[in-house]
Amino acid sequence: MQVAPQDRAKTLADSIHSWWRDAGVDYLCEETITNWLDEPAPPPATAEQLVRQAAPAPSPKAAQPVRTDWPADFEALQSAIASDARLPGNGFGPARAAPHAVHAPELMVLIDFPEEEDLRGGNLGNGPVGALLRAMLKACGYAPEKIYLGALAHSRPASGALSPADLPLLADFARHQIKIAQPEKLLFLGSAVSETLLGQELMQARTNLPDFNQDGGILTAVATFHPRTLLARPVLKAQAWKDLQRIVRKDQA
């Protein structure tokens, strides 16, 4: 049966009216066209909100400045390393491990940062890593108490590794330590120290045997594996001993 046009129009109107009613619309009284997809306009801001919007944002808390006026006196430098959190490498945590400081030593040893045992003891060279280092030094003819043992950082990074962004300043401070300590020879332990102070990866530095230029003076510098690496991989000890031959005392050769 064919539906008359006027009946179809009435049916459509009834359907639209039913949809409005189900949606809660009782009647349509606006004559202007409304886009129901538009986001509603926000309510006017209160006086309190206007004041808050006009106020400047709080400045972020400033980081503690890094100290660059490093002590030029040996004793003052050691005191600062032990106590001043503003020195490069001293601010990774609240605990620090002081160097084993000897002025004008025959050998100066540099590592990357302290072990957990060092932080608990308050100085570098504790725990299994320290014990292995002392054995290495004795085998080369050095009394451990007569060498300078320092680090790029005297606090320990939470990640267990130094950030590349920190290395340039740590390198400058390490060079300052070397200048003040005035050693005859240098022993760099681990990849971080080799790359930071020699500009070479450890495996490259081990074979190239680079010397270290300190204010125009040339120091013998040997790079080899960190004792923590040797503890984890004892098979490398033979290679490390080969590296150490370059700094073995003549009376031990």
Image: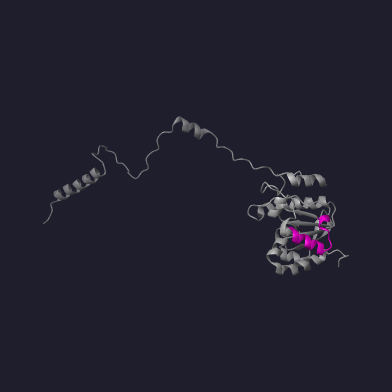
Q: Is residue 252 above or below residue 166?
A: below
Picture coordinates of residue 6, whole percent (x, y) = 14, 48
Is residue 178 a member of the stretch shown in magenta? no
Q: Quadrant of residue 68?
A: top right
Picture coordinates of residue 47, whole percent (x, y) = 46, 30
Is residue 132 a member of the stretch shown in magenta? yes
Q: Main secondary structure of the magenta part?
A: helix
Picture coordinates of residue 166, whole percent (x, y) = 68, 52
Q: Is residue 169 visible?
A: no
Q: Quadrant of residue 225?
A: bottom right
User: Which sits in the foreground, 91 or 132?
Assistant: 132
What's drawn in magenta, residue-wise? 130-147
Residue at the location (78% across, 62% down)?
A: 135
Quadrant for the C terminus in the image: bottom right
Quadrant for the N terminus in the image: bottom left
Residue positioned most to the right: 251
State left or right for residue 3 relative to residue 168.
left
Residue at the location (74% across, 58% down)?
A: 130
Q: Is residue 148 visible?
A: yes
Q: Is residue 48 above or below residue 5?
A: above
State left or right for residue 46 relative to residue 79.
left
Residue at the location (80% across, 44% down)?
A: 76
User: Which sits in the foreground, 147 or 168?
Assistant: 147
User: Which sits in the foreground, 209 or 92?
Assistant: 92
Q: Is residue 245 above or below residue 50?
A: below
Q: Quadrant of residue 148?
A: bottom right
Residue positioned most to the top: 47
